[in-house]
Image (cartoon, coloured by chain):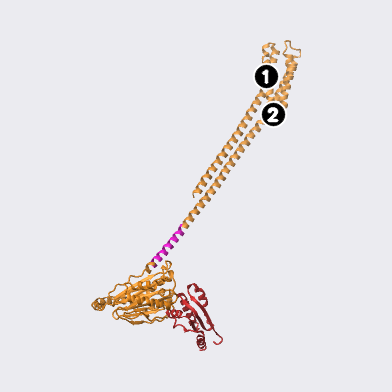
Chain colours: A orange, B red
Amino acid sequence: MGSDGRRTAISAAIFAIIVIALLVVGGLYVRGLIAQSFDIANRLTDARALAINALSYQVDEETGLRGYQATHQHAFLEPYLRSKPGFGPNLARLEAALPSLDLLDAKPAVDDLGTVNAHYLREVAAPLSTANPPANALALEALGKADVDRFRGDVRTIGLVIDRREIQAQADVRSSIDRIGLLVGAAVLLVLMISLLYGTSQAALATRVERERLRAAEQQHEADVLRTAYLTEKRIADTLQEAFVQRPLPTHPTFRFSATYVPASEEAKVGGDWYDALELPGNRVLFAIGDVTGHGIEAAVTMNRVRQALISSALLDPMPAPLLQRVSRELYTSKAPLVTAVAGFADANTYEFIYASAGHPPPLLIEPGRPPRMLEFGSLPLGAMDDNEYHTHRVQSVPGAMLVLYTDGAIEHSRDVVEGELILLAAAADAARVEPPDPATFIHDTIFAGREIGDDVAILTIGFAADPAVGVRISADRAQTAFSGNIAARLSDAQQRLARKVA
Amino acid sequence: MSSKSIAVIRLSGELEIGRRSEIAQTLVVNGSEAGVLLDFSEVSYADSTSLAELLRFRDEAAKLNVPVVIVIGSKQFARLIQYAGLSHAFRIFDNRAEALTDLSGAAHE
């Protein structure tokens, strides 16, 4: 934009200089033409005066001599004597003016003036100006008169030539004026053309400026769109990230929870592994762990959907097999990536773990006084088929028992899952012996001491309190449990009504 | 039925996401087969993406009514098949001869 402005200023300056130069040159030319015309007119007037002067000299000579002839008084000779020396120089000036004034047509008449005057002086004036007048004085006077008449005729001829020349000069002036008109017209036309060109270039410049402005607006719009897209993307990413942040584990007098999640790398932060633990009415807790096939936003979105579906569906009916069937059908219908999961609930009233598995590695159970063991598993991943069948497994356990759920990263570090399971069982046995406050992290750290983490790893443990006094506390809490159950039942009713409505 | 033949699809090594398109292009069924024998006797590992492809293949074969048997050589891969819940989805054998015999019987049923 700055360079365009500079260009405009330069164009305007050049334009002004051309116009001024044109006016100056035109003015000088016009001035020259007019001066020349006046000069010619003046000199023609001078030439005409010289011709008339010549006639005056001739007439004065003749008139003087005639007076002298009539009176014989010498005083009458005075005009003759005065005029005689002036004639020659006057005629010489007239002759000299002829070529430059283009009056050569008058040259014969001018020459004749000299001839006539000479004839007059020689043949008439010389005899008549003597003291004794000749006998043929009258004849000489008649001859002198004839010379004067011839002289008049020559002067008239010269006057006609000068008249013609004046007419021509006037025509020249007129044509000059016409030429000046043409010149002015041409100048005006040129100025107009330059103005037009300048205007056009200004218009082109304005168009370009407008185009630039539009392009800038367009770029701004694109930037806005990109910014919006970026903000949307960021919001999604933030939401996913937020969603990915695992819910805080419940605190419950009967249950002991611990969990850990370690992503494989920073890029895999938005991954597909998750775990959930949620308090249910009736001294029960819902648990779930899962892994969505793949990584990235799609995996994270699916993970979030499955989590929400599992929790909302579990509030309607926590029985694991139908729970997984419902979620699986939803995933299959929406063509979502496959998901492996273990979901179920722990019941502190009966010390039972009730769960179902969908294509997920087996849950691990640690019980006091027994070596850790893998529990039953199987069935297809969630979303694999429309009519996946799942089985609800009930595991009767004891106070102090702990269920260990994990994702495949915990056992696939060496690609040998059989060995991976053995390492996990060993880590679980260590945890049973050490009784760390955070068994999940302990197990993770034990497995990966000296091993590289190749995939996301999530571990969730759900344990029953070992303290027998807890059972007493459960009884004491019965009223509250019943109350919670009542609320849950009412909530459940409302949700079932909503579900029916949606269906 | 008798004009159809048994197709053998063989994959080996570690089946992971990097080989996804190869696996998808290999695991193809079009209904002209009397049965498909998946020879995975030299497969030692399969990630969840590959297992998902295997499930897709099983689904397509079921729709086309083509019986599928699978030969598994390594206990690691067998365990992964168990994890995926596929041990009930396929008839599993640890050698090719038994698998072929079973498949021939199924094809002539």
Mark 1, residue position: A86
What x and y, as percent, mark residue A187?
58, 41
Stretch in magenta: A220-240
Residue A99 has which mark? 2
Residue A495 visible in image: no
What amino acid type should be assigned to the residue bearing mark 2? Pro
Q: Are marks 2 and 1 in contact (CB under 8 Å)?
A: no
Asked whether, in this view, residue A67 is left or right of residue A254, the answer is right
Residue at (69, 25) in percent of width and height: A95
Magenta span has A225? yes
What x and y, as percent, mark residue A438?
33, 72
Quote the CA–CA distance across marks 2 and 1. 22 Å
Magenta span has A462? no
What amino acid type should be assigned to the residue bearing mark 1? Gly
What's the chain of the residue with tag 1? Answer: A
What's the chain of the residue with tag 2? Answer: A
Residue A427 visible in image: yes
